[in-house]
Image (tube, grey):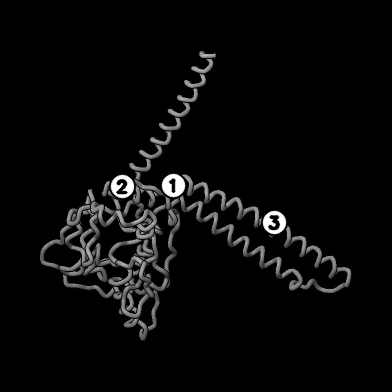
Amino acid sequence: MKAARRYVLVVVGGLIGIWAMATLGCANEQQQKGHELYGHYCSHCHGATGHQNEGFNWSSMPDPKPKDLSNKSEMGTLKDNDIFNTISRDMKDTSEGGDVIGDDDFAVPTMPTFKYTLSEDEIWAIVGYVRGLHGMKLEFKIEERKKELAAALQTAQANLDQATKTYEAAEKQASEEAEKKNVDVDDAVYAKEMAAMAQAKKEFDAAQAALNNFSTRPGKGTSIARPDLTVKPEQVAKMVELGQRLYENKYGCNGCHSLGAEGGKVGPPLDRAGFRLNGTWIYRWVRNPQAMKPETRMPALGLSDADARAVTMYLGTLRAPKPDAPIEKPAG
């Protein structure tokens, strides 16, 4: 009995050890992923250890400057979801008369969103790494989140299957009754079932996209078609004005790019963008930079077609004189 008991304890202890090693390995992998992503996308503004004025771009950025991510007294007041929602959000037009901004909305144009660039899993990895910069740990359960998304997709699939069967049965019954009466099928008879099936399909597509976006980058493999940038002469001035407003107050391009002596230095200066860059290239770049250069630090900011056209039009007007000295290459 004692030998058997020792055997059981050894087996159980071994299983616990394997589970602990797997869990630790997963945690270390997530931490390493967060470290690499932070270094590539965040450190130029926030610094390698999160301290202010540490990143090479920090001093060049317009106010408000990036937060001190190492400050536990401030960062500790934020929940994991607060940090996640700052990194993954829709950009807001902070201009007067722009978007409605709620009290809890984060609306700092020069802090870009990574909602359209990174997977949810990658963003959580960055959140976990940021937590470590101020001596805390990520409490959000990433594996549980993935299981929830998988379960939601399974439920949505079952609902779609049931709605499809109900629709097909109603359509068949309507067809049979119409044939008996020798009249055309009345689609209105099963319109309710058709609408229910369409709604179920919409919910299934949303659940599938949510699960896919957990581990797959949203813009991966998506190319932007060549746009028709023809604009009526009387609309040009208005579009240029809108483009400048979006450049400064919604997408915060001046946080990474400079015009003259003002602006960041992560990306190249844009003083002469109207000379150097083709309009079609600008449009496709601002819509999805990763589709054209996967390793770029510039994230996709979620520009709509209209916003991309306006920004493209504005950049086309930037035609500063050629500088006497060569333009210094960005440090990033």
Which residue bears the numbered disc 2?
136
Q: Residue 316, percent across and down?
A: 29, 73
If you read the primary sequence from the N terminus, does the residue marked by circle 1 or circle 2 appear first? 2
Residue at point 60% right, 50% down?
154
Pointer 2 or 3: first along the chain: 2
Q: Quadrant of residue 79?
A: bottom left
Is residue 331 among the parts visible in the rendering? no
Residue at image coords 30%, 54%: 76
| Residue 30 makes an appearance in the image | yes
Q: Amino acid at mark 3?
A: Gln
Measured in 3D between alpha carbons, the distance from the residue under mark 2 to the one under mark 3, in whole angstroms, is 46 Å
Q: CA distance from mark 1 to mark 2?
A: 15 Å
**10 Å neighbourhood of mark 3: few (<14), some, or many (≥20)?**
some
Residue farthest to the left, as pictured = 324
Label 3 sits on residue: 162
Per the image, label 2 sits on a secondary structure element best described as loop
Which residue carries the number 1 mark? 141
Quick check: 238 left or right of 166? left
Three-letter amino acid code at the position of disc 1? Lys
